[in-house]
Image (spheres, rainbow, N blue to C red):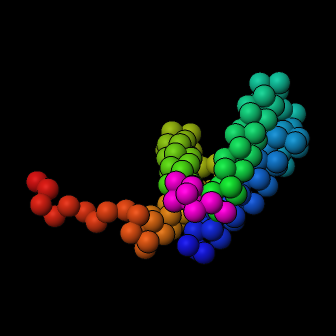
Amino acid sequence: MQLKKALLILAFGTILIIGMLYGISPSWFLTTFSTASEPASIDQTHILRAVMMLYIALGLFWLYAAFSDRYRDIGIVILAIFCGGLVAGRILSVVIDGPPSPLFVLYIFMELALIPICIWLLKKDGQLPPPDKNRN
């Protein structure tokens, strides 16, 4: 239980920082961490600020779940789904568009690493049932 709590608190802190980096100054973020050399357009700013608030909302849920016995496991499940969705999109983009900037490559590895950790934590406490051996 303490590992789940710690992971959810870490996820909150990480996603809060990443979200704030995206949305406080989208032009700074794009020119600093990507290959963009021009200031962000209004549409890019709009997307990055929306993503910032989505990340903050999820992060606040994970923080709440860390301190709630009732929501802790669902917080871990949502963290795994969140990371899985992001890493799937990032890998698709690598295949279609080519490799991104180094920061986004780091994100791929971070998100990919969290999925098995989440699954392990859920299995550890018996929240995920073992595979059905009688299934055909």
Whole-percent x and y of residue 57? Answer: 71, 43
Work out whether residue 113 or residue 4 is closer to the camera in this orientation and state it.
4
Going by the image, does 119 lie left or right of 62? left
The image quadrant where one finds the C terminus is bottom left
The image quadrant where one finds the N terminus is bottom right
The region drawn magenta spans: 67-74
Whole-percent x and y of residue 54? Answer: 70, 40
Instruction: Look at 82% across and 49% down and name the residue there.
Output: 21
Going by the image, does 119 lie left or right of 135? right
Going by the image, does 41 lie left or right of 4? right
> Is residue 1 at least partly visible in the picture?
yes
Q: Main secondary structure of the magenta part?
A: loop
Position above or below: 97 against 118: above
Instruction: Look at 77% across and 24% down and name the residue there.
Output: 43
Position above or below: 39 against 124: above
Give the total number of marks visible in the rendering. 0
Instruction: Look at 57% across and 68% down and name the residue there.
Output: 4
Going by the image, does 125 lie left or right of 5? left
Work out whether residue 49 or residue 37 is closer to the camera in this orientation and state it.
49
Q: Image quarter for residue 15?
A: bottom right
Work out whether residue 122 or residue 24 is closer to the camera in this orientation and state it.
122
Position above or below: 125 against 72: below
Whole-percent x and y of residue 109? Answer: 58, 62
Whole-percent x and y of residue 31? Answer: 84, 43
User: Farthest top residue?
Assistant: 42
> Is residue 30 at least partly visible in the picture?
no
